[in-house]
Image (spheres, rainbow, N blue to C red):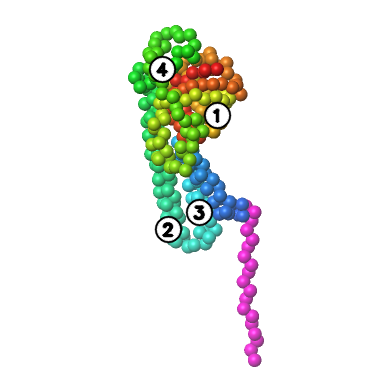
Amino acid sequence: MGVYNPPPIPPPEPKKTISQQILGWVVVGAIILFFLAGGLTFMTSGVPYHVLLADIFYCIAGVLFIWKFLTWEDAKQQDSHKRRDISAIAIGCTVVVLVVAVGGNHYLNRTIEAKSGETAQSGVSNPETPPPASPTKPPESGRDNVIAKDTPRVMARLTPLQLAQIYEQRTTVEANKLAEVHVGTWLPISGSVLDIWEVKGVNQEPWMTIVKVDGVAGVICSFRQEWYQRTAILQKGDQVKIIGKISHFDGYTIKLEECEITS
């Protein structure tokens, strides 16, 4: 009788280090999803530089995916030729997705940016621009204050919360079409001051105030030069009542121009 030789016992698989576990697909994938969701949020928001912030979040998500794929242990175990082909496919698909995401971001926001630029350049000479109401204006001086006082104002029929709700359960394209009828109407608001800053640019109203209003993240109000003293003395937390003409809004913020402080 021959001697029985048992089959060799395969060596145990090496345990993953703590760094390998932390940088596994589960953790990195969650981070990638976070940046993708952040890009989508900024893409449809009205915060300053939201288009640039969305592009940055999308690019970070793409770079993280490529880095994780190239350092993936299973991919390293493939032969060099097959690994090179798989890596090229993964990088190519990631670049295509990035191009689509960034391009879609700029395409969707192109209409809003064009409309904002036309509004900033229209000035007081635009016959469609209603003038500020005279009872709430401070003492006038200078040629910039020559405004027709008999042009009627069209008041907004919705509250800030109702305007923001237009973007709920709708795509941005669909909501923008519904929002067009409200752009140019005058909206009275009341809330607390969050910040005040100066805008330096051609054909722009120089003084900006952001006000916290129930139902939206904030209302950005722009004032003419003659409102400098009234806006400059405001402090954070001050309760104010303001009326302004709607130039843009979405599900997060509302932008008002030609604003006046009513109390």
**Crowd around label 3: few <14 · some 14–19 · many ≥20 (10 Å):** some
Q: Nearer the viewer, mark 2 or mark 4?
A: 4
- Whichever of callouts 3 and 2 sits on the residue coming sooner in the sequence is 3
Q: Examine the structure image and report whether residue 66 is included in the region drawn in magenta.
A: no
Q: Which residue reaches farthest left?
A: 127
Residue 211 position in % (x across, y down): 54, 26
**Which numbered disc, 1 or 4, marks the residue that appears first in the sequence?**
4
Circle 1 residue: 213
Residue type highlighted by circle 1? Val
Per the rendered image, the range of residues in magenta is 1-19
Q: Which residue is mark 2?
A: 85
Residue 46 visible, this angle: no
Q: SS at mark 4?
A: loop
Q: What kind of secondary structure does the magenta stretch mostly adopt?
A: loop
Residue 15 part of the magenta segment: yes
Placement of 183 over or under 170, stated as above or below: above
Residue 235's disc number:
none
The answer to the question of whether label 1 and label 2 lie on touching residues, with beta carbons closer than 8 A, is no
x and y percent of residue 112 in the render?
Answer: 40, 33
Query: From the viewer's perspective, is 144 left or right of 47?
Result: left
Q: Name the residue at 65% across, 86% down.
A: 3
Q: Which residue is mark 3?
A: 69
